[in-house]
Amino acid sequence: MRQALGKGLDALFKQQTQAGAASAGGHDTVRKVPISKVKPNRHQPRKNFSDESLLELAQSIKQHGLAQPISVVYDAAADEYELVAGERRLRATRLAGFEEIDAIVRPRPSDENMLAVALIENIQREDLNPVDTARAFQELVEKFGVAQSELARYCGKSRSAVSNCLRLLELEAEVLAALETARITEGHARALLTVPDKAARRRLFHDVIVSRLTVRDTEDACRQAAETAGSPSKTARRRAAKNVNVLEAEERLRRALAAKVEIRPSARSMGGSVIIRYHTLEEFDAIFGRLSGGTGR
């Protein structure tokens, strides 16, 4: 396998295409196969499937049929099929109550070749979340020595996009879990990557979740944290400025306004600033009402 992949993904996919053409008279073999005989792909990069999304797709399949066949390989000894790509379509078709599904049946490659083909096809065709995509990229790079530039070409991405995607795996497990379940976006995750200190990154991540920070707010907070980490004198000034009284005042304001409040004393004068963050006009109205005694805008 490593020898085959050593020639590059071009050689692998050319080999697969030629084998498929030879077995199907020059065309992919599409046939109805029993859903009960299709077993999951052992190398499925997608780990999470939205129940709501599957129900929507199942309803669409009931009304309009399956727009694109799944891809499988046939195991003659076991008389069953193994999925290569299309698990979401397979699950939705089963959910819709169908007993058969349209499938492109391809010759069975070696197990290692099948892994590479399955990962590439899923990355190209499926709406994977960023973490699943990054893990699929990592498996191809580390297990098969596929160059990032080649991955970028096959997946229609830039070389930097593949590199940035792989960098997501440097984040802590709780951050990756939040990204997988869409509690944060890829923009939030990329901003957190700019903070080298892991403890500071965890604190910022919890701020993002608790305060529902926008990507822009997260980028600003991460930039400030990165600058502070690189400037001991600035860190000392801020620690000195934020004494117990200031921290207590921040907490009292947070409780009174039900909003994220930050007090920034000036290092050069007796003044400073109070920053109140809001994320929607409804939140702004509520904060304004509390500040103005309930008179509204």
Image: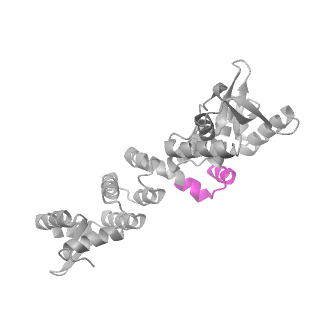
When the figure is inspected, residue 53 is found, relative to residue 276, above or below; the finding is: above
- In this orientation, does residue 278 appear? no
Residue at screen point 25% across, 76% down: 296
Q: Nearer the viewer, residue 93 or 265?
A: 93
Residue at screen point 46% across, 58% down: 190
Which residues fall within the magenta stretch?
146-164
Q: Is residue 77 left or right of residue 123?
A: right
Percent x, y of residue 255: 18, 62
* Quadrant of the drawing holding the N terminus: top right
Percent x, y of residue 189: 44, 56
Q: Nearer the viewer, residue 216 or 67?
A: 67
Q: Nearer the viewer, residue 264 or 228?
A: 264
* Quadrant of the drawing holding the C terminus: bottom left
Does the magenta-highlighted stretch encompass residue 152? Answer: yes
Instruction: State whether the magenta stretch is mostly helix, strand or loop.
Output: helix
Q: Quadrant of residue 16?
A: top right
Percent x, y of residue 48: 50, 41
Render colour scheme: one colour
Residue at the extreme left: 245
Percent x, y of residue 266: 20, 77
- In this orientation, does residue 75 appear? yes
When the figure is inspected, residue 272 is found, relative to residue 31, above or below; the finding is: below
Q: Quadrant of residue 109?
A: top right
Residue at screen point 65% across, 47% down: 125
Residue at the extreme top: 77
Does the magenta-highlighted stretch encompass residue 106? Answer: no
When the figure is inspected, residue 114 is found, relative to residue 229, above or below; the finding is: above
Q: Is residue 277 left or right of residue 64?
A: left
Q: Quadrant of residue 231?
A: bottom left
Residue at the extreme front: 63
